[in-house]
Every structure is written in C-alpha cells, then in structure tokens.
Image (spheres, rainbow, N blue to C red):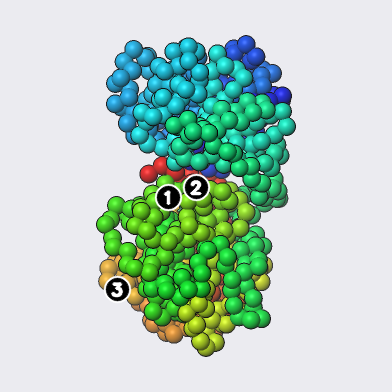
Amino acid sequence: MCGIVGYIGEKNAQNFLISGLKRLEYRGYDSAGIVTLDEKGKATLLRAKGKIANLEEKLAKAKRDDHIGIGHTRWATHGEPSETNAHPHKAGPIYLVHNGIIENYKELKAELSDFEFQSETDTEVLAALINSFYQDGKYPLANAVVQALKLVKGTYGIAVASEFAPEEIVVARSGSPLVIGVGHDETLVASDASALLGHTKRAIYLNDGEVAVIGKNSIEIKTLNAEPVSAKVEEIETNLAAIQKGGYDHFLLKEIMEQPESLTETLRGRVNAKEGTVHLGGPRLSVEELRKIRHLLIVGCGTAYHAGLLASYYIEQFTPEVTVEVVIASEYRYRSAYIPEDSVALIVSQSGETADTLACLREIKKQGVRTVGIVNAIGSTIAREVDGGTYVHVGPEISVASTKAFTSQVIAMVMFGLTIAQAKGVKGTMLRLYVEEIARLPEAIRSVLETVPKTVKRIAEKHAKYEHAIYLGRDTAYPAAMEGALKLKEVSYVDANAYAFGELKHGPLALIDDRFFEVVLLPKGVLYEKAVSNIEEVLARGGHMVVVTNVTDFDLPVEDVILIDAKVEKFAPLLMNLVSQLLAYYMTVCRGLNVDQPRNLAKSVTVE
Ligand code: AGP
C-alpha cells in the first residue's frame, strides 16, 4: 500500500518527510517523492524510482530549510514504477500525493484536454482536475479540492499543497486512511500513525468524506458538503520500540519471536482460567444477543481468511447449534449469498484497511447483520465501521508476511465463540478445557520458540534449493497447513500449496516427485493414524518429507522430523504454525531475498 506524509510547522519539512516515509517503507513501494515549499511558495520537488535511498541521493543536492511539504511512497497501480509516475504530481502550482484508485480517471482526463499530462497515472488527472477549479490560485485551495473530489469515483487519501498557499495543506479521504498528528507549533499528516511516532501521540483519524485544512497551529475539518466536523483527538497507542527491529535482523523474525508477548496482550483481561471463562466487552453483544446467534459468517483475505478457517474448526466443537461459514472477502463481496436470521459477521483484518474486506463489511451491514471486527490496527477504517469488535493488540505488524496477528486472530475468534457457548449455557468441561489451554498458550509458544529454531534453520537451508513444496494436514492441521504454504510462498517465492491430507489421492498425489518437498503437520489425535497412512502413500512415491509433530514416538522413515513439545493439545496446530513461519523465514534468508518486503506485495492491500 502506498504511504503519505505531510508536515507544516517550525521544523525542517524535508527531514520529517524522509523519516516519515522510512517508517512506511514496510508497506511495500516501488518509487518515492517529496515536495517542500519555502515561505514564498517556491517549490523543491524530488522524486525517484526504487527505494528511498535513491530519493535521499537527490535530496543531498537539494537541501532546503522549508517548513511545509508532502511526501509519498508509491506502489504502482496505474503506470509502471518510474520517476515520472512517482508522486507528488504537479499541475500548475498544485502538488498532490494520493493513495487509492480514481476509477473514472479516463473520463475525467478526457475533459482536461488542455492539460499536458506527463504520466500514466490516475493521480496526475486528479491534480489537473483540482487545478482546473483552483485556476492558479483564483479560488481557495480547499474549495478547488472539494469541487474536484465531488467528480471522483473511487478511493482516495490525498494531501495537496500549493505554491500560492505555502501556509496550508489540504487533506481528504474516502476509502484510504489518513491520520492528522496534532503537535506543538506543527501539524503532521500520514496514512499510518507509525509515521507520527516520536513527533506526537495525539491524532485525529479522518473519516471518509471529510476534508481538512491544516496549518501550523490549525486544523479545520468539514465534509464534502461543507458541514463542519468536530475533531476527536485520540491517543496513538503504539510506541517507537514497537516499530523498530529490536536487535533482530528482520521484522519478520522479531514478530515471530514476540508471539508469547503479543498473545499475552490479546488475552489480557479477557481470560479467567480459574473460572474457566472468557469475557469480551468489545463486540458489544448482550448475553441475550449472544444466546440467539445461530450462524457465524467469518470474512477475511489471505492470512486473515486462514485464521477464520482454523478458528471455525474450534468454534463448531463447542457451539453445537451454530453454523460457521468462512469466506474469502474478494469472492464473497460479489456473490449474492443469503445471510440467515440471527447471524453475526466476524470481519477479520490485521490492518483494518483491506479494500475487499472493507467492501464486504459495508455490504453485510447493508443487510442489517451485526458485525464484529477482529482487527489489530487501532482506529483503522474497519475497526471504526464495525458495530463492535475485539482488537487483537499484537502491536504494529511491520513485515508484509503476517505472523503474530494470525495466532492472535485465531484465539480472539475462539474466545468470541466461547462467549457464545457461555451465553448458551453449554455445560460440561469442554469450555473449561479450551479456556485453560488458551491461558497456557503463550508459555507453550515460548517453549517451542526456545527449542526449534536451530533445527528449523538447518532444515530450511537443506530445502532452500527446492522450487516446489506441498503442505499437508488433517482437521485443524489443514488450515494451519494452508497458512504455512502462504507464508513460504509469499516470502521465499517457492511454489507452495496446501492440501487436506485426505484429498491427496483425489489428484495432488500425482505431483509427488523430486521437484517437491512435503511439510506435514501431524498433531496427535483421532485422525493421527489416518494421517500416518497418508504419509506412507507419499513416501511410497518418493516424497522428501518434513514432519512436524507432537507425537514423541513417531518413527516413520521420513527425511526430517521436527518434534514440538506441545504443552497444549487442541492448539497444537498453532504451535506447528510457528515452525512453518520459521521455515519460511530461514528459507528466504538462505535464498537471499527481501524478507520484510517481498516483491509485488504490500502490507495492507487497500486497492481491489
Ligand atoms: C499475509 O501474510 C499476507 N500479507 C496477506 O495475505 C494478508 O493477510 C491479507 O492481505 C489480509 O490483510 P489484513 O489482515 O490486513 O486484512
């Protein structure tokens, strides 16, 4: 996802813009740029293809002590990654940075025939459109921005500066996040609060359809229809340490290794192991409303979808008369699926900004269905649009590959399921067993992370040469296998796919040959013997297998076994997933690839 930063105040704008863009690098980008204005409005525009370091090379020869500016990291959607297509885009005295997609940019461009376009981007069209209303400063900048936005179809988060108004920045959003940092004699703006840390902890989250004019000591927010909006200043919850590597080589490894702590934060105040109960206040559903639930719809993309799938296996165990349906947001939003009475929809998203998931949320709400967010990013769009929610509180997840959020999303959804079972008066020891395991899970994770990394690193180095991998599992190990395959493919570029073990003989078994290695997640339990016979089917066809298991007497002749000391039984697949995360990490390091910013991917997919 692209990144936006803006600054107006007493300090050097170039310094803030560059450091702010560096904070947003983790989201993925392929070009960057900044523009600053001196007090007379003289602009210094710098743009570069590739990493911010290339921009800094240009900056070294163009240092200015300007105190207002905007900057951007671009993840190409319209037009290839290039300096010409990089933001900020200029139209007359106007400079614009933009996140999102202007869907009707071609029609708008056709109306701007007298403008000489330099780039292939939709953003430059918006800049030209704004200037067509601004008429080189004849009208107030904010009015020109509003007039232009009223013609736009699509999504945007924008910051606009003008050579004729070097004392203000105009920002606006619809579908792409923007947060305003409230400082002393300075005002900042960013697409992600992490860029504001170290400058201010006071933030105003802009809402869709709002436009703000920000000055050094002023913030005026209105709707597109010029209705004044009273700004709610909130505390930014995270801290600098949380977004720095803390001594690890990569954010991915840091975020894998901090899962005992991050899950502890997810559980804080929500689990009573002594009583065998859980309590979630955020969903804002009464006991009566919980008791009435008959259908759970779980919506997400990628890892969030896998978390929902894994959670669904657990939830159906202890809420007998509740059906659980897990859907991929980008598919579900275009279906005309019927949502039965007495349904609740769980909207799962680490970033809280994923376009397809957000679109699903809005569709589902239109049908009058109660929505509960399972989100990490505080104040994100999904978090603010659901009817209630449970923040997973794992802290900023910087690496594109999601790890700690997955573990906590699963458990947060299991806890939500437990609150339904509690409200329905489900008797017996099952609920207590789940609650006790949840309470023990952070330590169980710690124990695995203290024991397996060396073995996993060795096995990863041995398998780094493979271009194909198959992940296999049954029951709760199957969604975990899906997540393991996604992890490996998205960071190491190995063609990794997961199959339900029982499905192998219905086709995928034909794949087995020396091109592949197999990872089998093998928890003890009722399906253990069936999985063992599946393993023998693969071995008989020359499989190169890594088995991850908590069965101490596992003794089939596979090439590698990773034994985990699972201090929990039901959630053993979550512990096995730690091995998958580490395997993906070490294979990627071995292959010399960019661990935290894999090619073609962004941390938060805010475009459809
Ligand atoms: C996970 O490793 C991927 N980066 C990706 O699949 C991600 O889970 C997906 O884009 C959903 O993101 P969200 O949780 O922020 O909505």
* Ligand 1 lies under 8 Å from the Cβ of mark 2: no
- Please say if 604 is above or below 428: above
Q: Give the residue type that dot 2 points to.
A: Thr
To which residue does mark 2 refer? 381
> At x 48% / y 57%, what residue is drawn?
387
Q: Nearer the viewer, mark 3 or mark 1?
A: 1
Numbered disc 3: secondary structure = helix
Q: Does the residue at mark 2 contact the one at mark 1 (Cβ under 8 Å)?
A: yes
Q: Residue furthest front?
A: 227
- Please say if 233 is above or below 260: above
Q: Residues within 10 Å of mark 3 (few under 14, many from 20)?
A: few
Q: Earlier in the sequence, mark 3 or mark 1?
A: 1
To which residue does mark 1 refer? 358
How far across and down, in percent of the image, does residue 121 sit? Answer: 39, 27
Q: Earlier in the sequence, mark 3 or mark 2?
A: 2
- Please say if 565 is above or below 216: below
Q: Which of the two residues, 142 or 113, is positioned nearer the viewer here? A: 142
Q: From mark 3 to mark 1, how far is it between C-alphas?
A: 38 Å
> At x 28% / y 60%, what residue is drawn?
337
Q: Does the residue at mark 3 contact the one at mark 2 (Cβ under 8 Å)?
A: no
Horizontally, is 59 left or right of 143 in the view? right
Q: Mark on residue 505?
A: 3
Q: Examine the image and state in which quarter residue 240 appears.
A: top right
How far across and down, in percent of the image, does residue 438 sit? Answer: 59, 74
Q: Examine the image and state in which quarter residue 305 appears.
A: bottom left
> At x 64% / y 42%, what residue is drawn?
233
Q: Give the residue type that dot 1 points to.
A: Leu
How far across and down, in percent of the image, does residue 531 sit? Answer: 41, 79
Numbered disc 1: secondary structure = helix
Can you say which quadrant of the picture contains the C terminus? Answer: top left
How far across and down, in percent of the image, does residue 73 sit? Answer: 52, 33
